[in-house]
Amino acid sequence: MSKRARENDTSGAASTAASTWPELLRTTTVQQLIDELRPSAERFQLVMLPHTASVRDALDALADKNVLSAPVVSASGEFLGLVDVLDLAAFLLATWRKHSRSYDERAFPAGAFFARPVTDALNYSGVDHTMGIPLTASLQELLDMMNHEYFNHRLHRVGVLDAAGTVRTLVSQSDLLRFAKRHEAALGGAASVTMHAAGLVRRPPISVRVDTPFVDALAVLVRNRVSGIGLVDHEYHLDGCLSASDLRGMRLHSFGLFNKSVLKWLASGTSSRGRPVQSIGNGDTVHT
């Protein structure tokens, strides 16, 4: 399909005529991905934060809608970037550490910190740069953007822009994984490739003990610019994980648990709750 034709017809499900994964990526648009994966009523429902919003406004908005991130826009609607719960937590840690390298509770940032503009926290964690992609772009273009060599890690999510350049929704790695699962037949032999052979295991795992103070575990996560770390018991057996998703629902009162253990945080720090441990090995396949 030509670029012009794709721009004139971006609705509907992904082409069932595509017989291979590369062909499916080339012929499916971001619009079609959204249409296929999301109910019509939810396709363009989006939490939007004005550039005048405060850190506390952002925390409340994300918690109220039970989402991890939101676009920040200017008064004219220009897409300024994304802010997520990890950015807000990283911003707080950096401010706190300026006054106490050991994160002493007595040096916890005062209320004035939470009144600071949310624009100060844009991509503070360094995980997701501000990127936008048109609804008419192909999934191959989306993948190329997420894996661009400019970034020292893969992007987790990007803004989706309409013809006027207005951000309409977000697409993430999870969306692409769900799409791949729905079109598993197109993967062919690639589905049988091991995680190691596919190059999906790129670095040794990072882990902390479950009794580590949450603030220290969060600092490890932020310092390494990763979205998740392992949690191990006293014998270093994997017991769980801590990820940005575990910050979902974080509000102002949640920070009172920052000096408690990771286990305590997972039990009562936010509306999120610890999940059963699921793990895969180097020898497991992409299908797994």
Image (tube, grey):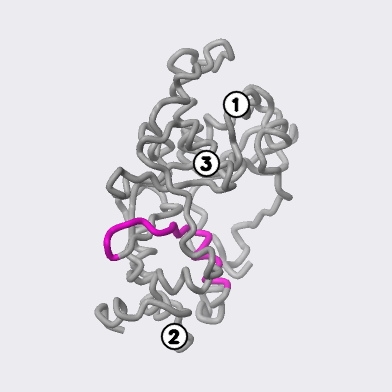
Report the label total: 3
Badge 1: few (under 14), some or many (20 or more) residues near its Cα, within 10 Å? some
Q: Position of residue 72 (x, y in %)?
A: 38, 44
Q: Nearer the viewer, residue 58 or 279?
A: 58
Q: Position of residue 177 (x, y in %)?
A: 53, 65
**Amino acid type indicated by mark 3:** Ala
Q: Position of residue 155 (x, y in %)?
A: 41, 52
Which residue is identified by label 3? Answer: 61
Q: Residue at x 45, y 22 (%)?
A: 113
Q: Which residues are magenta?
A: 163-181
Which residue is identified by label 2? Answer: 18
Q: Earlier in the sequence, mark 1 or mark 3?
A: 3
Q: Nearer the viewer, residue 133 or 219?
A: 133
Compared with 191, 240 (above or below) is: above
Which residue is identified by label 1? Answer: 255
Q: Nearer the viewer, residue 30 or 11?
A: 11
Task: State which quadrant residue 259 falls in.
Answer: top right
Left or right placement of residue 287 versus residue 4 in this view: right
Q: Residue at x 38, y 38 (%)?
A: 122
**Amino acid type indicated by mark 2:** Ala
For this orientation, the residue located farthest to the top is: 106
Query: Pointers 1 and 2 in contact (CB under 8 A)?
Result: no
Task: State which quadrant residue 64 falls in.
Answer: top right
Spatial separation of the CA atoms under disc 1 and disc 3: 17 Å
